[in-house]
Structure formats: C-alpha cells, structure tokens
Amino acid sequence: MRFLHSLLPSFLVLGAGLAQAASSWGFDDAVISVTGKGGAGSAFKDKLSDHVPLAKPVTLGAADSLKIVLTATEAGAAKRPHQAFLLVRDQDTGLEATFPFQVKESGKGKVDFTQKDLPIQLLTSSQPLRATLLLASFGSTQAFSNHVFNLDVKTDPNVPLPKYEKPLRYGKLDEIHHIFKADPKSGPKIISLFFVLSILATIPVLFGTWAYLGANISHVSKALGTAPIAHTLFFGSILAMEGIFFLYYTNWTLFQILPPAGVVGTIIFLSGTKALSEVQSRRLAGER
Amino acid sequence: MRWLLSFLLLGLLSVVQAVSSSGNKLLVVLEDLAEKSKYSKYIADLEGRGFSINYESPKSDKVALFELGERAYDHVLLLPTKAKGLGPALTPKLLLDFINAGGNILLTLSSSNPTPTSLVSLLLELDIHLPTDRNALVVDHFNYDTLSAAEKHDVVLVPRPDAIRPDVKNFFRGDGKGGDVIAFPRGVPQELGNTSPLLTPILRAPRTAYSYNPKDEGEAAEDPFGAGPQLSLITTMQARNSARFTVIGSAELLEDAWFDAKVKRSVGLGGVGTDAKSVKTANQAFAAEVTGWTFNEIGVLKVGKIEHYLNEAGVKSNITNPKIYRVKNDVTYEIEISEYSWDKWVPFTPQAGDVVQLEFSMLSPFHRLPLTPTTTTKNSTIYTTSFRLPDQHGIFNFKVNHKRPFLSNLEEKNTVTVRHFAHDEWPRSWVISGAWPWIAGIGATITGWVAFVALWLWSKPVPLKLTTSGKKIQ
C-alpha cells in the first residue's frame, strides 16, 4: 500500500514529511488561468503543483479574472473535501482573504475571483500576495496545505483606488504643538537712532532760532525781586508736574500720581495767579 | 463532599482575600443549580478571589439585576441555558441598563444550546454578529485535539493570544513562556463590526478555522459564515463608562473537564506539530485572566491627585490648581495614575510604544503632549509635563483622555481661564527700538515747553529796530 502511495505524485511531498499518515488530501489536474475582460484570449494559463509554488507570480490585472480548477483527492481517489479554501495573504500585514472553492460531489472544484473581490487592503500591498491552498475534511485524513503561487495585483493606474478610511481605534494620537504667533519686531535700530538724533537736533535749532530773534530771560531778577515765592513755586511746580509724569511713565500707577498731581496742580494754580499778575504788571508798565 | 469542604475553606479565605476593584457581588445565571458542579473549579477560583456568588435560574422569579432602581450585583455571569429566551428579568434592555449602570457581564455561548434570540439581539446591538445558523460552531482541520475530537475536529486548540497591537498591553499571555494551549471546544464564533472602537477580540480563530453548521455536514463549506482570524472566539466590549462585557464563545472552556484535560494537537499548516505531545490545557489560568479582566480585577486605572501650577523660568509657584492663567505662561501639569492588579493598586506604566497624553483644549486641542513618568510611589506613578500656554485667551481644559483597549477609560478635565496680557504686562516702550523716536519727540516737546514757559515769564523785550523802509524787524 505504501509503495503504491509513493507512486502517486500527489503524495510525494506529504509522504516525505508525514511518513506515518495513513492517507491524506491532495489534488490533481489543477489549472490556474487568468482571462481578460469578456473571456477573450487566455492571458495566462499554468498547471499548479502541490509541492512547489509557481516560479513566477501570477499577474492579475484590473479587468482580469482569475480561475482555478482542480480535482480534490483523498488518498489518491477523487473526493469532495469539506474545506477547500484559497487563502490570499498580504505579506506586509498578515491580512488574509478566504476564497472557498465550489466543489462538486466528484471532487471537481473551481474558484474564480477578480480584483473587485479582494479587500482594499490587499490591493495596495507592496509585495505579491501569497496564495495558500487548503484541502481538508473531517476524520483522520491528513489535511493538505501548501503555498501554491504568488499573486501580483496590478491595479489600473488610471482608476483611483477605492478610498480606505482607517476605522477608529483607541490608541496614542499624534502630538500637537501650538504654533505661536511671531513676536512683533521693530525695524533696524540704526534707523530709529537716526530719527532720535534728528528729533533731538530740533531742540538746539529751536533755541538757536529763539536766541537769534532776541529771546532772553533777563527779567528773572526783576520777577524774583517782585514775587519771589510765586515765581519759584510756579516754575518749580511745572517742573515737578513733568517729574510726576515721568514717574507715571516709568513705574507709578494712576492712583499713585493723582494725589501729588492734585497738590502740585493747586500750587500751580495759586502761585500761577500771583506770578502771572506780576507778568501782567510788567506788561502794563510797558516792559514787555 | 470534599469540594464542599474546600468551598467552605475558600469562603473563609475570601474574607481576607482582596476582591475586584468594583465590588464582589456576582450573579451566576444558569439553567439548573445541578449544573454548577460542571464548573466547580472555575467557581472555586472565583470564590477564592473573593467573589460572593448568588446562583439563579433565569426562570426563577427572584432573579433581578436591579433592586429599587440600583444595581443589585456588580457582575453577572451568564452560563448557557436551554430555554429560548432568558425571561423578563434578563431582557436585552435590562442587560444594557446593567452595563450602563457600570455592571460587568460575562456571557458564555455554547453550540449545543442555541443562543437565545434575546441575547443574539443584544449582541447585534453591540455590533457582535453570531452565525445565522443557530447550531453553527467553529472547526479547524489543522488545529484540533486529536485525543477528543479526532473525527469532528470541533475542539480547536489555540495558543495564547498575542497582543492585538504592539502598543497594547497583553493581559492574556499567562507567564509569557509560550507553549500554552487553550482548548476551545465546540464554540460559537463571533464576527465583529469594524466601526466600533469599543470592541476588542481577546482570542481569534486560527487561519485555517471556519464556521459551519453541523447539520449540513455532508456538504462542503462553500459559503462559510466566516473563516480565519476574522472569527473572534472571545470578544470584549468595554463601554464608555468602562463597564465590561465579554463573550466567551465556548462555555465548555470553563468546565472542569477542560481545565484538567490533556490535549494533543493535530498536524497543522506546513506540517507544524507533527510530533506533538499531549499537554495539559491552559484553560484554567486563561479563564481566570479573561474573567478577572471582565470583573475589573485587572486593567483598571484610577487617577489620584491632579496638580497644575505656574512654572515660570524654572520657579515653581506655590499656588496649585489656580483658576486663571495668562497666555504664554509656562505651566506644569501632574497626574497620578494607578492600575489595579488582582488585589492591589500598583504604579501604572503604559506599554512600550504607548504614552499617556495631555491635551490643552478649547473645543479642539491646542496642545497634545506626552506625559512622562517622573515619580513612582508604592501604588501610583506621577506623570508630568511642562509647556507654554497658547497665545489665545479663553476657557481651556487640561484634559487627559486615556482610552486604550483592555484598560478602563480615564477622562479627566480641569477647566482654567486663560486671560490675555494685562496693560502693565507688555514690554515697556523703551525696550522697543521702534518707539525711540517717539520717546525722543516727547522729550523734545517737554524741553521746548519748559523753555517756552520760562521765556513767557521772564523775557525782556528787545528795543524795536526799524528798517529803512519803516518795517519793523525784531
């Protein structure tokens, strides 16, 4: 019996590995064919072997349909197995699609599929898909499983692939770092400095012009002689008010400057009345 | 009699044993109390872990999941029944209410007892699909037990599951040595909807497995309900409130017979296992892990203290958790997370490749940053991160939304106001070079004004000079 088995080609491989197996599943006359649209002209046809995969990957174009016809055998005799599956596996991700054969009582089975029947994930695989044939049934008969061919899916470059949206799964999300608005920037300092200097230059120009026109403060002694307190306080408190403004600019708050500003303002008002009366008296005396 | 004694002993033990993180009241629903003996080891395990168990038949009028509107039990174990339905006390709606109230359910199916339609519809609602043939079971001609199912191939032997993703913790790997075999006898496979992130399979069928109806055994499997790893053998659903629902496709997996059984695998794909030895199943340990997960004994996270504070220029502010910050403040956030492991809280460490993330969000996140563990206490890890608040004022949340398969959900939200710069917090004008000409302008004006006041007060008129034409010049 064993001698007979070893004569059957389909048992060569399995027989080597599983010398003890009483019987096992296998197949005969397996033909794989790829036909173009409308069945016009067989593009590809080959015989499948049960122990070595086809040397070259089978190419499946966008409009092609792949068909495998085989006869399943149990211990060499044609028989229908319960499980006759072609598994097509994406070698990147390990995802696998199953194509069951339509098997008749006689053990003759066929399976055909096109690109449309493949899940989108397999269409986009970077490597050829690995096709494994499974023939198995209940009982103790050894099941058959072998890598039979590689499938190279050629998608139509003109037709966009169906969109695959990754379903929501809980996990780490992408990091987000807020993008801050850029800080405001000033122009080159040299330009600012140029304008600072040209503005400051107006002060000597102003004083010079006044001096040329005969401006003077020769009446200081006269004014101080007539109303010393009023003039000192008036001019001094005007300077003090500027000082308060400077403090407000540098570090005081509004409520800090209001009391001194009130005091200084009152002094300006009271002393100003006197000081300006003195100025008026000089004008009335024709000295202005 | 012996087991009764050990029950008593274990019952006493359970007083000192710690229990699940969410209570120990367990309801076991089974057809007949006599069936209890089939699961004696499993039940002894449960009692040994501190569960106090009530047994009820679905027909009994005492069985009620709720009492006065409150959950009457913390966990429910549904063992297969022969009845077509589970009766008015266990309708799908009540079971869902139970989940919504935070209760955990462990559901077991069996191909010998067709699943009641009420349960099928409950599962459908959760996007778990059972085969349409009510007797369908999963077979594998490559990974079956040659000792008990040499003919029917319906005792599928499965290795311990791998982690579903590299970044997901695997609670079901046992001691991790490998070589463990789980016997999955006559189980009902499930298919899972692809859209729900709440569903996670614990155990999937091997590549070569498929579902079939034993009633049409003569025919070939030309249109199986499902095949390969698409079929889930043990499925979990963790609701948004972290209530857990697990479907074990084979109730027999929990039986004493399969806890002790010796199994010997068949020859698998590519000749694997040609010289398989008979080994003891890992069902007992695996069942404990699956049950422990379902009843909140493992994979439960808890948040302890949350702190956030101002941390400008490396100086930690003494005020923790202020209600208000300013835009562009430097802030540090700390969160303390613990994980429950069977009977105690332990420091939580995410799986390699995974990370706890903090979001700083107003409607949508402005920042999503990884939190790094800094300190570990006896039973918690403190995660922290420092960052600069965005330059946008408004009401923001510090949000830790940690949702991972097999871990209970953490959702922590701390609301703070982020105000804009106050008028005195901007850089002063003298540090802005563009403002210098204006400052100089004010200086020039003041100088001119003070000088003018002096002139006005004290200027002496110059004598009038007349030109030859009689016009006056000054």
Image (cartoon, coloured by chain):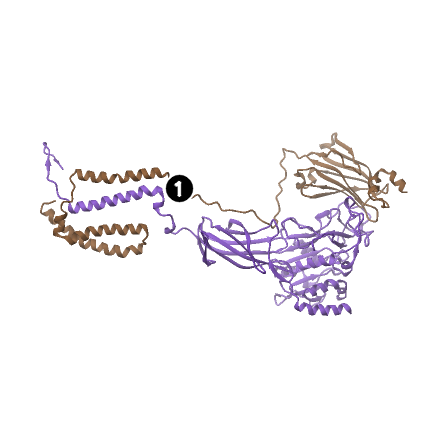
- Colour in which the image shows chain A: brown
> Is residue B137 visible in the rendered structure shown here?
no
Q: Residue at x 24, y 52 (%)?
A: A240
Picture layout, residue B150 above or below residue A212: below
Q: Is residue B437 visible?
A: yes
Question: Which residue is pictured at 32% across the width and 39% down the height?
Answer: A193
Q: In this picture, is B362 found above or below A34?
A: below
Query: In the figure, is residue B434 to the left or right of B407?
Result: left
Q: Quadrant of the C terminus of chain A?
A: top left
| Observer-nearest of B114 and A248 | A248
* Dot 1: element: loop
Of residues A61 and B342, the one nearer the viewer is: B342
The local crowd at label 1, few if under 14, some if 14 to 19, many if 20 or more residues have their Cα within 10 Å, is few
Relative to residue B35, is residue B194 depicted above or below? above
List the residue tagged with mark 1. Answer: A185
Q: Which chain: purple?
A: B
Chain letter for mark 1, please: A
Q: Amino acid at mark 1?
A: Lys
- Residue B43 location in percent, x, y? 72, 64
Residue B32 percent across, percent down from the top left: 75, 65
Which image quarter: residue A147? top right
